[in-house]
Image: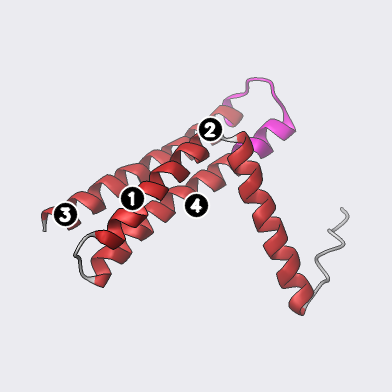
Amino acid sequence: MEESPFKGKTGLRRLLNAMGYSLQGFRSAYRHEEAFRQEVLLAMVLIPVAFVLPLPGLSRALMVGSVLLVLIIELLNSAVEAAVDRVSLENHRLAARAKDIGSAAVFLSLANVAVVWTLVLTG
């Protein structure tokens, strides 16, 4: 199996390539994934709110971290879905399982936001 020609890059070139791939990934997720766009909107509301509320730094970090975790897990879920679809678009129980498990991870991350924010705000 052939490896990527970019794997041998080191130093600043590797860092710049990685940053470019990451930005491309954000753009792709935003362009093609409705759920990601919705969660970005949620983050654009909740993260500033966390900074406005008079809370200790650790509470603020937990609130912001829980929101960022949703975006991270949604990106991973979208990557799993794209890889599964790349292999085959036909219905298969293992493809469905992979997608369902990714969806469950996103759901748990959203539930985590609700729990963290509720606990922080209610003391």
Residue density around tag 1, few if under 14, some if 14–19, many if 20 or more, within 10 Å: some
The image's mark for residue 73 is none
Q: Can residue 2 be seen?
A: yes
Residue density around tag 3, few if under 14, some if 14–19, many if 20 or more, within 10 Å: few
In the displayed structure, 101 sits above or below 62; it is: above
Q: Nearer the viewer, residue 13 or 7?
A: 13
For marks 1 and 2, give the CA distance.
18 Å
N-term-proximal mark, 2 vs 4: 2
Q: Amino acid at mark 2?
A: Glu
What is the span of residues highlighted in magenta in the rendered image?
81-94
Is residue 73 one of those drawn in magenta? no
Toward the top, the furthest residue is 91
SS category of the residue bearing label 3: helix
Question: In front of the other: label 4 or label 1?
Answer: 1
For marks 2 and 4, give the CA distance.
15 Å
Q: Amino acid at mark 4?
A: Ile
Q: Residue 76, how many percent across, how many down?
A: 55, 47
Residue under pointer 3: 121
Residue under pointer 4: 72
